[in-house]
Amino acid sequence: MGMITNYSYVVASILFILGLKMLGSAETARKGNMLSAAGMLIAVVFTLLDQGIVSYFWVFVGLLIGAGVGYYFAKTVEMTGMPELVALFNGFGGIASLLVGWAAVYEPNANTFLMSTVFLTVLVGGITFSGSLVAWGKLNGKIDGKPMVFDLQRAVNIAVLVAIAVCGLFFLNTDGGTSIWLLALILLALALGVLAVIPIGGADMPVVISLLNSYSGVAACAAGFAIGNNALIVAGSLVGASGIILTQIMCKAMNRSLSNVLFSGFGEVKQQKAIEGEVKPVSAEDAYYILEASDSVVIVPGYGMAVAQAQHAVKELTELMEENGTEVSFAIHPVAGRMPGHMNVLLAEADVPYDQLVEMDEINPRMETVDTVIVIGANDVVNPSATNDEDSPIYGMPVIEVTKATTVIVLKRSMASGFSGVDNPLFFEENARMLFGDAKESVGQLVREFV
Amino acid sequence: METVLLTIVLVLSIFLGFELISKVPSILHTPLMSGANAISGITVVGALYSAGGDNPFMATLLGVLAVAFATINVVGGYMVTDRMLSMFKKKGSK
């Protein structure tokens, strides 16, 4: 690596850091992303000009294929499909690092330090790759989303870990080149990735993608050590830190520890308190009268809204209520949607301005002053058992306290329970009104009432 | 000595990462993640040396594959992040 190339990496790192800093505010975020991309471009161009690169044909073949596929994915993905895409990209990052680590064993001066960094790169890269593919499959329904648990699972996991340690020791004593131990390590790492993700249920995928996001950074970082490249270390650890923080936020929002998410399927459902009271259905016309008379309305959207493709109709309804003089905002639970921040993107796509989106911690203290809450496609995140029923499996999970508002209108297809399979006493509350039907149609009816 | 320097870089970057990311508001967490994805595509730089350097055939082959995968991350990650961020609008700015 030449001196100039190394300095270009310093510039690239600065741009990555500035880019991430600018992601701290919605106003500067887009510029920040461009800055970060510019940093990447600088790093790539200066690397290509480095004297270490002697042949260009295959390099450009790789770059063109990657750019073409990346362009295609970025242009065609639906916003509801973002979690799948991020899972897939995490996997690609992992496999790229694995391959770079693998190629590093052909260095002429392979020593134990190099081999141990290759070991780490291959291990983390392999886990990230196969784990991400399983997560991707679970998210798009190609693999059953239920936690997959089998007998002897723990024993198999331990056996794989032991095998990795043994192969690792033999691998460290090889002197470069693709040895049988390296190949065994790669296969074992891939197996471990699959084993780690299959027992985790679909509802916990936001945690898993965040964690795999972190791993993809760690893999890049390890590859950086293997080839002695600062750019990989800086960028990789930034990504590693980012993924860990998001993982923590997700776990906190579900009131579960990381180990609980990783090592056990969702807890068995204990016998809950019997729910008393009756469900009070409401017609679209009556719901309209309630909304028409409200000064402030808070909409709590869940992934069900996106599934029903109701976000555009919701936006229309919001505008009509605002014209009617009602103050409307959206309360977003951190685990609404299927990845961190997913709901915000879905609403942004429907042209809902971001200053109308309110976080849970901000809305809860002033919920009592809200006239009407509309719950659309959300269930667990508004379940009052989380605060008042110690026997509930989701007890302790922070929720949006919708029952404190004067009236709650719940849009729901039927009385089925939510993602976690837990009953929701909200529907039986004194101030709750159920508007049954497809979310998009119900919102459409409300819109027609207003017009 | 070089290992020590690389480790210092590692430790400082981790701290910096935590500082920076904890300031990102939750409405931007999805773009943050896809943007981070793109940044982890930095592996492309290492891959370029394997693919284009004076290396044995096997290293070149692995390098080319790595270049392709990492470039998907870089190009796809930055583009999709930009696409998302372009949709975030403030009230009244249509």
Image: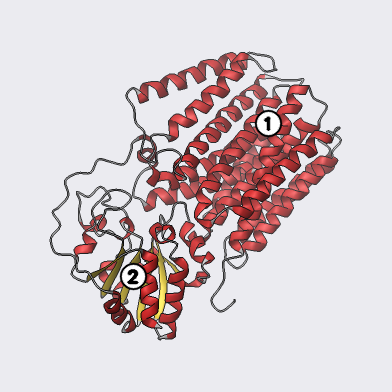
Near-viewer residue (A439 or B69): A439
Secondary element under disc 1, as helix, strand or loop, is helix
Left or right, A159 with reference to B19: left
- Check the residue under mark 1 and report the chain it is in: A
Q: Which residue is mark 2?
A: A374
Residue A432 visible (yes or no): yes
Residues under labels 2 and 1: Cα distance?
51 Å
What residue type is disc 1 on? Val
- Report crowding for label 1: few under 14, some 14 to 19, many 20 or more residues within 10 A (C-alpha): many
The image position of residue A400, as x and y in percent, is 33, 63
Instruction: Tell me which label, 2 or 1, sits earlier in the chain.
Output: 1
What residue type is disc 2 on? Ile
Q: Residue at x 44, y 60 (%)?
A: A306
Q: Residue at x 60, y 24 (%)?
A: A119
The image position of residue A227, as x and y in percent, is 71, 31
Q: Which residue is mark 1?
A: A100
Left or right, A375 with reference to B14: left
Q: Nearer the viewer, mark 2 or mark 1?
A: 2
Left or right, A53 with reference to A159: right
The image position of residue A27, as x and y in percent, is 60, 68
Near-viewer residue (A322 or B44): A322
Quadrant in which the C terminus of chain B appears: bottom right
- Report crowding for label 2: few under 14, some 14 to 19, many 20 or more residues within 10 A (C-alpha): many
